[in-house]
Structure formats: structure tokens, C-alpha cells
Amino acid sequence: MKVIISGYGKMGHMVEAELKERGIELVEASEDIASVDPAVAKECVCIDFTWPDSFKANYRFIADNFKAAVVGTTGWNDIKDEVLEYFRKAGTPLIYASNFSIGVNALFAATRRAAEILKGAGYTPSIEEIHHIHKLDAPSGTAKSLGAIIEDALGASPEISSVREGEVPGIHTVDFLSDCDRLTLRHEAFSRKGLAAGAVAAALLTETHPGVHEFSELI
């Protein structure tokens, strides 16, 4: 497998290190994915960690030219149906996630199961997410995903609070509170390595999973 990274910020560098550790060829790390030679792109998986506006501008180029795509960029839910349909029509495998961490995806699953059990039992849900001061979006994409899971499984929309402090990689806490007790589920990232490892794992999955998938469906 060959990879081209779209976006060469902190996550791009972490993905590069993960590829090197696994012995996977990195062809290029590009800040302008649309400038990549289509002849080169067709042999590569694109791993995209950019900004919402950048991905929105470039997803058609990625779908039309790359062998497959892994998208960790968040903030494009407003055009999600359009993006997924475009990849389907292009026949380009796509795996996307609001968070590629295996631990966070376990949190997604645990939250859904807890919400299913607690439905109708008088529990009020809430979510707190804490990230570094450089993170611009609030709430985080992960918190929004947790909120959607709770709303679907519990039938109630949780209040989401966002905190920005220091260099915190990411902490997500889910609370279910009743008059009798409190259930808390919490994930704390120590670095971005878990995100990079999950994204590279997803890139490998594109070789055996054609079509369009959310990462949580495949693990």
C-alpha cells in the first residue's frame, strides 16, 4: 500500500511517523491535495486531516483520482450525504470517522449500550470535552458523535460543554445522572498517536472493504 497525506500539520506528522513505524510507503505529504498528479494518486490511499473548508473544496478531486480515502477531518456534516454519495458513485472506497482512536470507538460502543439500557429509567445525559487551546471547533466532532449516539439510543439530547486548556490532547466524559446514582464513561488521550494508528489501520482496511464506511462499523 502507498499513501499520500492531505494536510501536513500535527496530525499529518503523526500519521507519517505511524506509516514509517509500520513500513508503509509515504509517497507525499501535501498541503494542496488537488495539486497531486492524478497518475500518482490512483496508486495511493489519501489520508486526509485538514480543515473543513479544505476538505469540502477537495473531496471531489480525492474521490475522482485516488485509489481510496481515509478522512479524519471533521466539520463537514452539513454536506455529509452529498460527500458519501459522491464517493459511492465514483466507486472509491472511503472510511471516515470523527475520531479514529480505537479507545474512543470503544467509548462510542459503550455509550450506545449504556443509553439503550438506561432508556426510560429517568437518566439525564451530559457530555464534557476538554482539548488544547489551539483547537478551534467546539464542541469537538467526537462530542457531537457521542451526542448523536445518546439521542438515538436514549431519546434525549445531552448538554455538551467544551473546555479549552493547555495542551490537553483530548478528554471526553459522558455522564448519565438520575435521582439514585450517576454512571460515568470517560476516555483520555495521552497524545495524537491513537488517532494516527487508527487512521493507518483504516487505510489498510480500504484494501479489503470497498464502498463507504464509518470506521466504527468496521472494528
Image: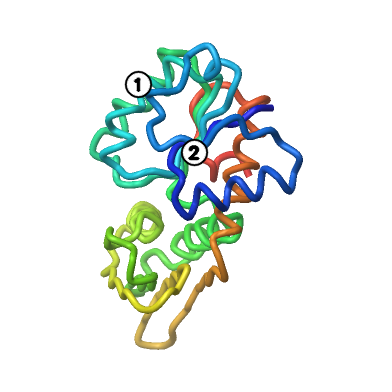
Neighbourhood count class around disc 1 (C-alpha, 10 Å): few under 14, some 14–19, many 20 upward: some
Q: Which mark is residue 60?
A: 1
Q: Which mark is residue 214?
A: 2
Most extreme residue toward the bottom, as rendered? 180
- Amino acid type at image mark 2: Glu
Q: Please say if 188 is above or below 116.
A: below
Q: Residue at x 33, y 65 (%)?
A: 134
Along the horizontal axis of the image, is 139 left or right of 214? Answer: left
Quadrant containing the N terminus in the rendered view: top right
| 130 or 16, nearer to the observer | 16
- Amino acid type at image mark 1: Arg
Q: Residue at x 67, y 25 (%)?
A: 208
Q: Residue at x 37, y 80 (%)?
A: 177
Q: How is the image coloured?
A: rainbow
Q: Residue at x 63, y 34 (%)?
A: 26
Name which of mark 1 and mark 2 comes first in the sequence.
1
Q: Please say if 83 is above or below 23.
A: above
Neighbourhood count class around disc 2 (C-alpha, 10 Å): few under 14, some 14–19, many 20 upward: some
Quadrant containing the C terminus in the rendered view: top right
Find out whether the residues at labels 1 and 2 contact each other: C-beta distance under 8 Å.
no
Image location of residue 96, percent across then percent down: 47, 38
Q: Which quadrant holds residue 158? A: bottom left
Most extreme residue toward the left, as rendered? 78
Callout 2 secondary element: strand
Along the horizontal axis of the image, is 209 left or right of 118? Answer: right
Image location of residue 173, percent across then percent down: 44, 73
Q: Which mark is residue 40?
A: none
Image location of residue 105, percent across then percent down: 55, 55
Callout 1 secondary element: helix
Image location of residue 33, percent across then percent down: 41, 29
Q: Is residue 174 visible?
A: yes
